[in-house]
């Protein structure tokens, strides 16, 4: 199992990563709003085709990135909750320790390497 010092290390790591993601999400939110404004604004001609191909593709791309960031943030929040509850570092599927090296690579990992491969 992880030592208290190791858990504190991952706690700090996850919190730092969380701040980065929040900043990135805020930037993405701004650009999403800009795309939205570009789509809904404009003259009468645009209103016939509010989802023009260029803006639509731009929207999909940004919305996709936004979704990935949001998912990563959710995973980090879940990991921070497990740290508080004392379950951090244990596989959610089999209950075995996830392993320091795997957590070092993926601090928000929920599964041990065996379970991750099995799924
Ligand atoms: Zn497992």
Image: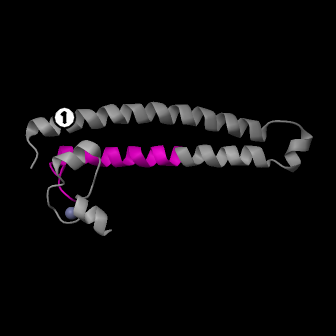
Against 112, is 44 above or below?
above
Q: Badge 1, how many Cα within 10 Å: few under 14, some, many 20+?
A: few
Instruction: Find residue 58 and report its horizontal and vertical position in percent.
Output: 68, 43
Q: Is residue 107 visible?
A: no
Magenta range is: 66-91
Q: Closer to the camera, 77 or 56? A: 56
Q: Closer to the camera, 52 or 81? A: 52
Instruction: Report if residue 18 lies within the magenta region.
Output: no
Under tag 1, what secondary structure? helix
Ligand 1 quadrant? bottom left
Q: How many marks?
A: 1
* Left or right position of 53 against 108: right
Against 66, is 92 above or below?
below
**Given the current orientation, which residue lies at the most extreme bottom position?**
118
* Left or right position of 14 against 59: left
Residue depicted at x 46% and y 45%: 70
Residue depicted at x 33% and y 68%: 119
Instruction: Find residue 18 and report its horizontal and vertical position in percent.
Output: 36, 36
The quadrant holding residue 4 is top left
Instruction: Find residue 90 and report its horizontal and vertical position in percent.
Output: 17, 55
Report which residue position mark 1 lands on: 9
Instruction: Find residue 109 and report its horizontal and vertical position in percent.
Output: 28, 51
**Given the current orientation, which residue lies at the most extreme right position?**
45
Instruction: Report if residue 73 lies within the magenta region.
Output: yes
Q: Is residue 77 visible?
A: yes
The secondary structure that most of the magenta stretch takes on is helix
Q: Closer to the camera, 119 or 91? A: 119
Residue depicted at x 23% and y 64%: 114
Residue depicted at x 74% and y 43%: 55
């Amino acid at each position: 199992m992880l030592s208290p010092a190791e858990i504190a290390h991952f706690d700090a790591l996850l919190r730092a990563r969380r701040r980065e993601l929040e900043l990135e999400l805020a930037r993405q939110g701004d650009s999403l709003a800009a795309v939205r404004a570009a789509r809904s604004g404009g003259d009468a001609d645009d209103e016939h085709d509010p989802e023009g191909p260029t803006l639509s593709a731009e929207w999909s791309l940004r919305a996709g990135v936004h979704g990935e960031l949001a998912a990563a943030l959710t995973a980090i929040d879940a990991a921070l909750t497990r740290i508080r509850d004392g379950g951090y570092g244990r596989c959610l599927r089999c209950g075995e320790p996830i392993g320091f090296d795997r957590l070092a690579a993926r601090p928000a990992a929920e599964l041990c390497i065996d379970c991750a491969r099995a799924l």
